[in-house]
Image: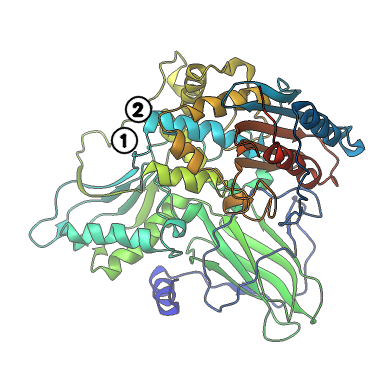
Amino acid sequence: MIKRFRTQIYLGLLLLVPLIQATTPIVAQQPQRERRVTAAGVATPTPTPAPTIVPFETPQASPTPTPDVVQTRTAATTRTLTELQTRISQVLSKPEFAPATIGVKVTSLQTGRVLFEENANKLLRPASNMKLYTVAAGLDRLSPDFRFVTSVYAPAKPDGNGVIKGDLTIFGRGDPSIAARFNSGNYLKGIDDLAARIAAAGVKRVEGDLVGDETYFTGPQYGSGWEWEDLQWYYGAEVSALTVNDNALDLFVKPGIQVGAPALITTGPPDPLLKIVNRVVTGARGTKRELNAYRALAGDQLEITGSIALDDKGYTGGLGISRPALLFAYLLRASLSQHGVTVKGITRTIDARPAAGFVLQPLNTPVVNPGSTRIEIASMQSVPFSVIAAHTLKPSQNLYTEIILRTLGTVAPPAVNTPNIDRTSESDGLEVVKTFLREAGINPSSLVLSDGSGLSRNDMITAEATIQLLTYMHRHRYASVFREALPIAGVDGTLRTRFKGTPAENNLRAKTGTLSSANSLSGYVRDAAGEELAFSIMVNNYPQDADVRATCIEPIAVLLASFAGKSE
């Protein structure tokens, strides 16, 4: 937990733009499509903002979100394969699923026999089940012990007085663990650790600029096929080789001191680059919370409109930030000051988008200005990839998956004939994933891979391919790491509140997936006879008011956990 005095220090150092607490009436909504903040926000019981480690996935587009806790009745034990198949077919034949497309496949990992399948070769949107493919390829190619490295470069080591005569460049390689999630909720510890290393290298003064270099990844800062209205939220955060706090901010909205007063709006951590236009007023006790937020693409102004009741405990949400590498550099500059290091020049970045006339370097080559030299004076390593894999799959973290994809394309770019100008870290990463899938016995030409996380609506996979992947990873040299990274039913991650009181609780390990009109669950479960099963359930194009989790996916999963027969 960050103490209040620490936050105030940073506020002063960064010369934050004050929050604009407008007292004007609520204005008409912008003509652009806005994302409505519902009353499902998390209350903040303490006055000091605390980081929100968001455990859920991309929200449903329906006006009434699926409840966080779904009560799934324990299914009666089935003792024959025929009975199990009949029960699953009954679930799938419900009238509300008539317009939907459902792909299901279940196999025994011991015998290889198929227990059930329907539409297993139909291409369907996987949502976050896509993360299974990216993380599996990451484990295979990078190993569980791989660590992301952030380097600090200078023209030369500091002189006898601790002076760097030139720029101090922070060269990022995608480390996602410089974040509150990995530091007991402390927004700034990762930044502080890097600043401490720079000070320990003898640096006391930088005559040049503080430069955040994010050129390790090439290409756009968003995943292919992402929709613009996702991009202002935490789950559509910009992808950068220099990442801080999931490239997102926690947004806190609390009522003012009296009815009609402006609401109190803060962010964690403070962002000196963001201007907040506060058009939220405090409403009467018991009134419904109505909040709307809008930030233009790549914009640095967030406008929040609406009302919040005087007795409301407060709303917490996650916002994506613009230019995360620059925020990284600003936060680091403040921390360096606290460590006795001053920077004379400005704070700036070198991004991954080439200027006119720029010649693309090989994807795994740090960019250095012609005729210049740089030496590494400090560095910092991430936690092992096995830990990052769990922090990716369990909470369904989109940014981390996209970082893994781009790292695959940068560390070991594939041998392709595509012209350099058409290649990006993302496209090369997808080629690495496809090569891995071929080795796993999966034909990637029958799939459509657009991004790494599944946020793209263009991704298309089959239940058959997912079962092949799960079977391959069950026998993989890193099988235990892959399995342990998956959410556990009723215990953690996106399954922490699901399957309570059923045979699947603390048994089933699976990846969830949620988009508007796409819901999925794929993973492993041990049945009542002790046989381990791999399963994939994907539901697409269902009516907006259908709760497919409670009425389709979870009943099937519980039936599998309750099966007491034999697959042979």
Query: CA separation, marks 2 and 1?
Result: 7 Å
Q: What percent of the width, then of the height, locates residue 398? A: 56, 44
Q: What percent of the width, then of the height, locates residue 40? A: 72, 63
**Quarter-of-image position of residue 304:** bottom right
**Secondary structure of residue under mark 1:** loop
Q: What percent of the width, then of the height, locates residue 446? A: 63, 17
Residue in the foreground of this view, choosing between 545 and 344? 545
Residues marked 2 and 1 touching at CB (< 8 Å): yes
**Quarter-of-image position of residue 90:** top right
**In the picture shown, does residue 480 fall above or below 496?**
above
* Amino acid identity at mark 1: Val
- Give the quarter of the figure containing the C terminus: top right
Mark 2, residues whose alpha carbon is within 10 Å: few (<14), some, or many (≥20)? Answer: few
Horizontally, is 365 left or right of 158 in the view? right
Q: What percent of the width, then of the height, locates residue 372? A: 21, 38
**Secondary structure of residue under mark 2:** loop
Residue in the foreground of this view, choosing between 295 and 24? 295
- Residue 455 visible in the snapshot: no
- Residue 306 visible in the snapshot: yes
Q: Which residue matches tag 2?
A: 361
* Amino acid identity at mark 2: Gln
Extreme residue toward the left, this view: 160
**Quarter-of-image position of residue 216:** top left
**In the picture shown, does residue 449 fall above or below 509?**
above
> Which residue is found at the position 42% from the left and 29% from the top?
140
Horizontally, is 262 left or right of 48 in the view? right
> Which residue is found at the position 33% from the left and 42% from the top?
147
Q: Which residue matches tag 1?
A: 367
Horizontally, is 333 left or right of 395 in the view? left
Mark 1, residues whose alpha carbon is within 10 Å: few (<14), some, or many (≥20)? Answer: some
Residue in the foreground of this view, choosing between 52 and 166? 52
